[in-house]
Image: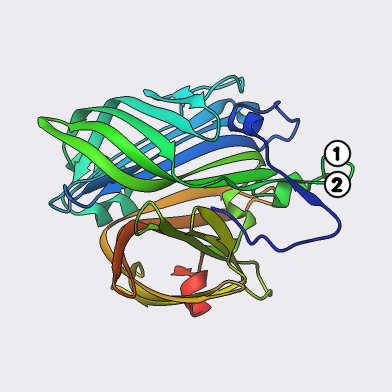
Amino acid sequence: MASGSEENPRFKMKLVPEDDYMHPLEAAENFNESMYFNVFDPARGIGGWFRLANRPNEGRGEMTCCIYLPDGRIGFMFRRPERRDNDALDGGGMTFTVVEPHKKLTVTYRGKLCVLTNPQEMADPAAAFKNNPVVEAEIDLAFVGVSPMFGGEPVKPDGSAIQQDAASSFARGHTEQHTKGTGTIRVGDESFTIDGLGLRDHSWGPRYWQAIHWYRWLPMNFSEDFAMMVSITCQPDAEPRAGGMVLKDGKYVTIRDAKIETVYDENDCQETFSVWAKTDDAEYDVTGKVMSLIPLRNRRRSPDGEDLMTRITEGMTEYRCGDQVGYGLSEYLDQIVDDEPVGKKAGC
C-alpha cells in the first residue's frame, strides 16, 4: 500500500524505470523487497492477487497466492521459502518477471491452493489447511500498465538516500500502477480465462508489518481511463493521513484528502463502506461492497518479548462512483489490541 504524497522540501521523489528491477540488499535485518499484483474480470466473476517478497537477512521469502472464484470460494496459499539473496522475485512456485519496466510484467504460479468454501476459516490457518481440500493450480498472467507510475523513493535534494530507522520502517521506496491483466487460471479441474483490470505495486527497504497502527488501502478500476487508489494510514496518538491518486485523462491526479466510513460484519471485517476523496479540482463519492473476503495475519515477537499480531483483511470489492461500476480490492490492516482491530476502534 502507499502512503500520502504531500510535497516536502526536505526531499524529492525519485521515479526511474530501473526501480522496477531488484535493489541492493541493505544491512537492516528486516530488509524487504516485494511486488504485488491484483486483477478482477467482472464478465467471468473471477479475480485474484499475488505477492512475492524477499527477506534475505532473515533467511526467507514470502509467497502468497489468492484466487476469488465465481461462486464465492477462495483458493489460498502462503509459503516462506528459504531465501538468502535478493537476485529475483521467485519462490514457493511463483515467479514475477519484468518484461519491460513500467510497462509489462508477468506472473506465473505452479503449486497448490487450499480451497475454502468459508474463507473466514483462514482466521485459524492451521485448522483451515487441515479441514479444506488442497488442489493443484496453474496461473499464467501478463500485466500491462494502463497508467503512469505513481510514487517512487524519497531521496535528499542531492539524490542521496535518506537514513531510516529500520525498526519503525514500512518501505524505503514504493510504486504503484493501474494495469490490465490477461491470461489463464486453473484451480483443480476448473480453468478460467482472465481479461480484467487491476493494480500492481513494488516496495523495497526495511519493513515490519507492525510499523503502521492501521491503514485502509482501496485500489479500484472503473475503466482503463478512470481508476483510483485511496489510502488512509494512522499511527498511535496521531491523526490519520490520506493519500492516493485518481487516473483521469491518462494522468494521475493526487488525492489531497479522503475519509472512509465502514460497516463491519460479525467478524469485524469490512462489509460495506463509503469513501470521500478530494483532489485539487474535484471531489469523489464512492461506495464499496465486499463480494468475497479472506482474513490474514502476521505475528511477531518484539525485542522485549511482547507478542504482536497484525490482521490484514483482503476483500474483492464492487465499487460505485456515480453511474460507474468498478472492481478492485479493499485491504484493511489493523494491529489487534484487546482482541479488537484498532482501526475499527478509531471509527474507520
In the rendered image, residue 9, in percent from the top left (x then y), is placed at 85, 59
Q: Residue at x 16, y 36 (%)?
A: 192
Badge 1 is on which residue?
Answer: 160
Q: Is residue 51 above or below residue 46?
A: above
Q: Which mark is residue 222?
A: none
User: Mark 1 falls on what kind of element?
Assistant: loop
Question: Marks 1 and 2, how far apart in space?
Answer: 5 Å
Q: How is the image coloured?
A: rainbow
* Lateral position of residue 225 relative to residue 134, left or right: right
Q: Quadrant of residue 254?
A: bottom right
Q: Secondary structure at mark 2?
A: loop
The residue that label 2 is drawn on is: 156
Residue 158 is situated, as x and y percent measured from the top left of the image, at 89, 42
Tell me residue 194's x, y (percent): 24, 38
Residue 301 visible to the viewer: yes
Q: Is residue 10 above or below residue 262?
A: above
Seen at 71% across and 26% down, the residue is 24
Bin the neighbour count of mark 1 within 10 Å (Cα to Cα): few under 14, some 14-19, many 20 and up. few
Residue at figure coordinates x 37%, y 74% from the top left? 273
Task: Kindly tell me whether residue 318 is visible in this rendering.
Answer: no
Q: Are marks 1 and 2 in contact (CB under 8 Å)?
A: yes
**Residue 109: x and y, percent?**
33, 26
Q: Is residue 188 above or below residue 230?
A: above
Q: Amino acid at mark 1?
A: Ser
Relative to 131, 332 lies left or right:
right
Quarter-wise, where is residue 51 in the image? top left
